[in-house]
């Protein structure tokens, strides 16, 4: 599997949950919490399920937290991928 990074995460966020008009996902968003980016728990849950399905991994429930950041979610994805490798 090639890497799953911020570009891929942004693509999944847009595809699975949309994008708020006033949020620029092209900026430096790694440490901005999902709530500030306009994603609620349902949108984040959809995003996590999409990632799990596409990558064939399972993420912990803590990955679905609007207070977490893209960096935190990417860290969870990296750990999950390493577990199945």
Image (cartoon, helix red, strand yellow):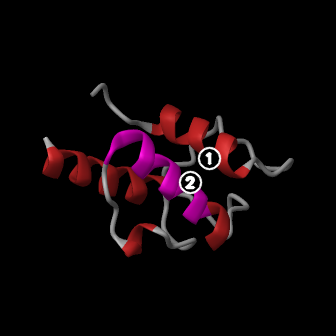
Q: Residue at x 57, y 71 (%)?
A: 66
Q: Which residues are magenta?
A: 44-56
Q: Which residue is mark 2?
A: 47
Q: Residue at x 43, y 47 (%)?
A: 53
Secondary element type, mark 1: helix
x, y percentage for residue 78?
A: 27, 47
Magenta stretch holds residue 81 = no
The quadrant of the image that shows the C terminus is top left
Secondary element type, mark 2: helix
Question: Mark 1: few, some, or many residues within 10 Å (few <14, many ≥20)?
Answer: many
* Residue 50 higher or lower than 67, as above or below: above
Question: Mark 2: few, some, or many residues within 10 Å (few <14, many ≥20)?
Answer: many
Magenta stretch holds residue 47 = yes
Q: Nearer the viewer, residue 2 or 49?
A: 49
Q: Contact, CB < 8 Å: mark 1 with mark 2?
A: yes
Q: Nearer the viewer, residue 45 or 35?
A: 45
**Quick one: which residue is furthest to the right in this view?**
21
Query: Quadrant of residue 40 in the image?
Result: bottom right
Left or right? Give the position of 33 relative to 80: right
x, y percentage for residue 43?
A: 66, 62
Q: Is residue 33 visible?
A: no
Q: Which secondary structure is most common in the magenta stretch?
A: helix
Q: Which residue is mark 1?
A: 13
The quadrant of the image that shows the N terminus is top left
């Amino acid at each position: 599997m090639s890497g799953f990074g911020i570009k891929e995460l942004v693509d999944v966020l847009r595809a699975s949950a949309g994008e708020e008009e006033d949020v620029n996902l092209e900026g430096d968003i790694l440490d901005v919490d999902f709530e500030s980016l306009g994603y609620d728990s349902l949108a984040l849950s959809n995003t996590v399920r999409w990632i799990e399905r596409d990558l064939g991994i399972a993420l912990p429930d803590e990955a679905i937290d609007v207070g977490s950041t893209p960096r935190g979610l990417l860290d969870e994805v990296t750990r999950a991928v390493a577990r199945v490798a």
